[in-house]
Image: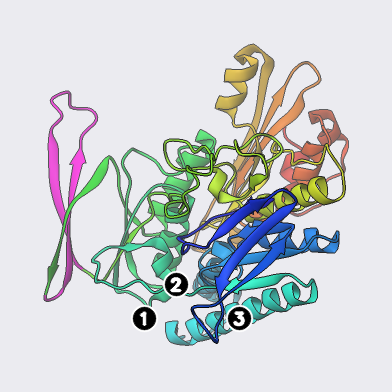
C-alpha cells in the first residue's frame, strides 16, 4: 500500500506495488551500483504533518513503515509555515504592545528591534522541532529516507516561503495576494517596521471568508498602516540600483470603459508572491500509476482518502481541501486506523473545521459563512446575530482596534452553524466555541451560559 502525501518535488524512487506490500529499491551508500530491496506495509511520500502522523500511527499498529522526504521533516507547517510564522507574529504582537506601554503608565524609552536575533532564535527552535520529529520516527521504528535537493538561480520576486530566509528586515515590502498568508505576512512586516504594500485583485482580502470578516480585515490592515492597492495587479518588475521597481495596474470598477491607472512602487527590497500554492505532484508519474488529479494537480480522493488506484491513498494539502495542519494529521491517523486496525468506517469529518488567521488583530472562524448558509438553507431559514465593540484593553489606549463577532443560526431551533470573529484574543477564544458548534449547540444554549466578565468572549452569550 502506498500512502501519498506530497508537498514538494521528490526525486524518482524505484517503487513497485507488491500484492502484500510495497517494495522499494535504492542504491547502497557504499556501492552505488548495488541495490537493496526492502518490503514495507506502508510507504509515505512526504514527511509533512499528515505523512508523519499517519506513518507513526501505522507503525504503532504494527505496520512496517517508511517515509521519503526531500527536505526537512515536518513539512510546510514546521519549516516554512504556521510554526515559524507564529514566532514572527508573536514578535509583531510585542511591537504592537510597545506602542501601548505609555497608555498603561510605562516609560520604555527607545526600544530597538533586531531581526537577526529573532531569526536566529526562530531557526534554532525549528531545528529543535526537526530533531524531535526524527527522534519520534526512530522510536516508532519508522525508516526515514531523506534526499536533499538544492535549487539555484536568481529571481526578483520570491515565493512567500522565502520570507523565512530573509536575513534582515526589509525597508520596503510589497506582497501580492489576498489570502490569509498574504494578510499575515503583510501584518507581520508592517508591524515590525517595514513599509508595506499589499496588492489585491479585487476590493477586499479574504474573499472566501464571511463578508463581515473580509470587510473588517481589509479596514484593519489599512488602519494599521498597510498600503492596500485594490483592483490591482502587478504589470512588471524591474531591478534598479536602489532595489526593485514594481509597476501596478489598477482598474476603476466604477468606470465602464475599463480605464486603467498605472502606478509604481520604487526601492522595493522584498517582493513576495502569496497567490496560492500548487501541489508538487509532477515528477512522480502518478498518472501512469492510475492516480487521477484535478486540473490544478490535486490528487482526487473520496471520503476515505482513497485515490483512483487501489492501494494508493492521499491526505493533506495535496488533496486541495482544508489546507490545515490539524486536518492532515487527523486524516493521516484515521487512515492508519482503517488500514491497519480494521476500522472500516474510520474517516475524517471535514465539517465545521475551526480556522484562525494570525492577522492584526487575529481572526477566528468555524462553520458556514452567512452567504453559504443562505445559499444552502434559504434566507428565510437563517438568523444572524452580530456585534462590534472596542475591547476593554483598548479602552485606554490611543491605538484603537475593534472586535467584531457574528453568529450564523439556522432553523426554528436556531442551531449555530457558523461563528466568525476578529479582535484581540480571538485566536485563543475559538477552540471552545468550535467544540460547542461541533456538538450541535443552539443559540438558546449560548444564551443559557453565564457570561465571564469582563471579557470579549462574553459577547457571544449575550447577543440579542
Rendering coords of residue 265 (x, y %)? 19, 60
The residue wearing badge 3 is 125
Please say whether residue 112 is visible from this viewpoint: no
Residue drawn at x 62%, y 63% as measured from the top left: 24
Is 294 positioned to the left or the right of 231 in the image? right
Indicate the quadrant where residue 56 lies: bottom right
Is 396 magenta? The answer is no
Q: Secondary structure at mark 2?
A: helix
Is 246 magenta? The answer is yes
The residue wearing badge 2 is 164
Callout 3 touching callout 2 (CB < 8 Å): no
Which circle's residue, 3 or 2, is located before the other in the chain? 3
Q: Nearer the viewer, mark 2 or mark 1?
A: 2
Is 335 positioned to the left or the right of 226 in the image? right
The residue wearing badge 1 is 168
Q: Secondary structure at mark 1?
A: loop
What span is colored magenta in the figure? Answer: 241-267
The vertical placement of 366 against 254, above or below, is: below
The vertical placement of 434 against 391, above or below, is: above
Rendering coords of residue 225 (x, y %)? 37, 59
Rendering coords of residue 185 (x, y %)? 43, 61
Which circle's residue, 3 or 1, is located before the other in the chain? 3
Please say whether residue 15 is visible from this viewpoint: yes
* The one of 224 and 434 positioned closer to us in this rendering: 434
Is 401 positioned to the left or the right of 221 in the image? right
The vertical placement of 92 against 420, above or below, is: below
Residue drawn at x 18%, y 67% as measured from the top left: 244
* The one of 118 and 134 positioned closer to us in this rendering: 134
Amino acid at each position: 500500500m502506498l500512502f501519498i502525501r506530497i508537498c514538494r518535488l521528490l526525486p524518482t524512487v524505484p517503487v513497485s506495488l507488491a500484492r502484500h506490500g510495497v517494495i522499494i529499491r535504492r542504491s547502497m551508500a557504499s556501492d552505488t551500483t548495488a541495490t537493496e530491496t526492502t518490503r514495507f506495509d506502508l510507504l509515505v511520500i512526504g514527511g509533512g504533518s499528515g505523512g508523519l502522523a499517519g506513518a507513526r500511527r501505522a507503525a504503532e499498529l504494527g505496520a512496517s513503515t517508511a517515509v521519503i522526504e526531500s527536505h526537512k521533516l515536518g513539512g510546510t507547517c514546521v519549516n516554512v509555515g504556521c510554526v515559524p510564522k507564529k514566532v514572527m507574529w508573536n514578535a509583531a504582537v510585542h511591537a504592537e504592545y510597545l506602542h501601548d506601554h505609555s497608555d498603561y503608565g510605562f516609560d520604555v524609552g527607545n526600544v530597538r528591534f533586531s531581526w537577526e536575533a529573532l531569526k536566529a532564535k526562530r531557526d534554532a527552535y525549528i531545528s529543535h522541532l526537526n530533531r524531535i520529529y526524527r527522534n519520534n520516527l526512530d522510536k516508532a521504528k519508522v525508516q526515514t529516507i531523506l534526499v536533499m535537493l538544492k535549487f539555484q538561480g536568481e529571481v526578483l520576486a520570491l515565493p512567500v516561503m522565502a520570507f523565512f530566509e530573509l536575513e534582515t528586515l526589509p525597508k520596503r515590502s510589497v506582497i501580492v495576494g489576498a489570502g490569509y498568508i498574504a494578510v499575515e505576512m503583510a501584518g507581520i512586516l508592517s508591524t515590525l517596521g517595514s513599509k508595506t504594500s499589499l496588492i489585491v485583485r479585487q476590493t477586499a482580502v479574504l474573499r472566501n471568508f464571511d463578508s463581515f470578516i473580509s470587510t473588517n480585515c481589509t479596514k484593519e490592515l489599512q488602519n494599521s498602516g498597510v498600503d492596500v492597492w485594490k483592483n490591482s495587479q502587478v504589470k512588471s518588475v524591474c531591478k534598479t540600483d536602489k532595489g526593485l521597481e514594481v509597476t501596478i495596474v489598477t482598474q476603476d470598477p466604477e468606470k465602464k470603459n475599463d480605464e486603467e491607472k498605472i502606478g509604481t512602487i520604487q526601492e522595493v527590497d522584498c517582493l513576495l508572491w502569496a497567490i496560492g500554492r500548487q501541489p508538487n505532484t509532477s515528477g512522480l508519474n502518478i498518472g501512469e500509476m492510475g492516480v487521477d488529479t484535478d486540473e490544478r494537480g490535486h490528487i482526487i480522493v473520496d471520503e476515505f482518502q482513497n485515490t483512483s488506484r487501489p492501494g494508493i491513498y492521499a491526505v493533506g494539502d495535496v488533496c486541495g481541501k482544508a489546507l490545515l495542519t490539524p486536518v492532515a494529521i487527523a486524516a493521516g491517523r484515521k487512515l492508519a486506523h482503517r488500514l491497519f486496525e480494521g476500522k472500516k468506517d474510520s474517516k475524517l469529518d471535514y465539517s465545521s473545521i475551526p480556522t484562525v488567521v494570525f492577522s492584526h488583530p487575529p481572526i477566528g472562524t468555524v462553520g458556514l459563512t452567512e452567504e453559504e448558509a443562505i445559499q444552502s438553507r434559504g434566507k428565510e431559514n437563517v438568523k444572524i446575530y452580530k456585534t462590534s465593540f472596542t475591547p476593554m484593553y483598548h479602552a485606554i489606549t490611543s491605538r484603537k482596534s475593534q472586535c467584531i463577532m457574528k453568529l450564523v443560526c439556522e432553523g426554528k431551533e436556531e442551531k449555530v452553524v457558523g461563528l466568525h470573529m476578529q479582535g484581540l484574543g480571538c485566536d485563543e477564544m475559538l477552540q471552545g466555541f468550535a467544540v460547542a458548534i461541533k456538538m450541535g449547540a443552539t443559540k438558546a444554549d449560548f444564551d443559557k451560559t453565564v457570561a465571564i466578565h469582563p471579557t470579549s468572549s462574553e459577547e457571544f452569550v449575550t447577543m440579542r
